[in-house]
Amino acid sequence: MQGTNFEVEEDYPLQKETGIIINIGYEIYKQLGAGFLEIVYKDAFEYEFQLRGIFYEREKEYVVKYKDIILKHKFNADFVVFGSVILEVKAKLGGIAREDLAQAINYLKVSGCKVAVLVNFAKEKLEVKRVIY
């Protein structure tokens, strides 16, 4: 709509980095569309990160501290990108669910990262959520 001003929240952590990750997600969606398993989209992200020289860690393992011990079960984030953003890749027909957001918050807690990006490739258009902790 011409003449309509929309206020956009532009002051959040790692805006540039999350924007790059989200744009890569759109590029992947443009090329592959919906319907593949998560692993295919993860492989595409890895290819794009390598192509662009972006630092990432795939299936980054995190331990969970409880009181004065480390619990035996660990978390594996799909990716940690730029050393500071958790990327979780989904291919769920129902969309990004509350449990996916809760999972991202848990990853943020144990990793010390401040921002997570969740992308879901299973719908008619790419679904994206930023989680700030």
Image (spheres, helix red, strand yellow):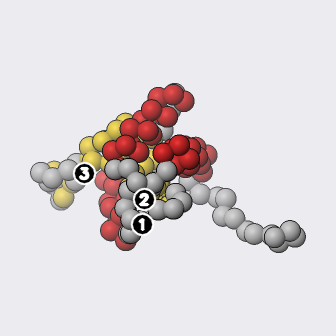
Mark 1–mark 2 Cα distance, whole angstroms, equals 7 Å
Q: Which residue is mark 3?
A: 75
Which quadrant would the C terminus be assigned to in this image?
bottom left
Residue 112 seen anywhere in this rendered image of the structure: no
Q: Nearer the viewer, residue 89 or 101?
A: 89
Q: Could you classify mark 1 by the number of other residues whose Cα lies within 10 Å: few (under 14), some (14-19), or many (20 or more)? A: some
Q: Could you classify mark 3 by the number of other residues whose Cα lies within 10 Å: few (under 14), some (14-19), or many (20 or more)? A: some
Callout 3 amino acid: Phe
29 sits left or right of 37 in the view = right
The numbered mark at residue 14 is: none
**Which quadrant of the structure image shows residue 52?**
top right
Q: Earlier in the sequence, mark 1 or mark 2?
A: 1
100 sits left or right of 76 in the view = right
Across and down, in percent, residue 63 comes to 22, 48
Q: Are marks 1 and 2 in contact (CB under 8 Å)?
A: yes
Mark 1: which secondary structure?
loop
Mark 2: which secondary structure?
loop
Q: Residue at x 32, y 61 (%)?
A: 103
**Which quadrant of the structure image shows residue 20?**
top right
Across and down, in percent, residue 106 comes to 32, 60
Q: Are marks 2 and 3 in contact (CB under 8 Å)?
A: no
Q: Nearer the viewer, mark 2 or mark 3?
A: 2
Mark 2–mark 3 Cα distance, whole angstroms, equals 24 Å
Q: Which residue is mark 2?
A: 122
Callout 2 amino acid: Ala
Which quadrant would the N terminus be assigned to in this image?
bottom right
Q: Residue at x 56, y 47 (%)?
A: 30
Q: Nearer the viewer, mark 3 or mark 1?
A: 1
Q: Nearer the viewer, residue 6 or 11?
A: 6
Across and down, in percent, residue 4 comes to 82, 72
117 sits left or right of 36 in the view = right
Q: Which residue is mark 1?
A: 95
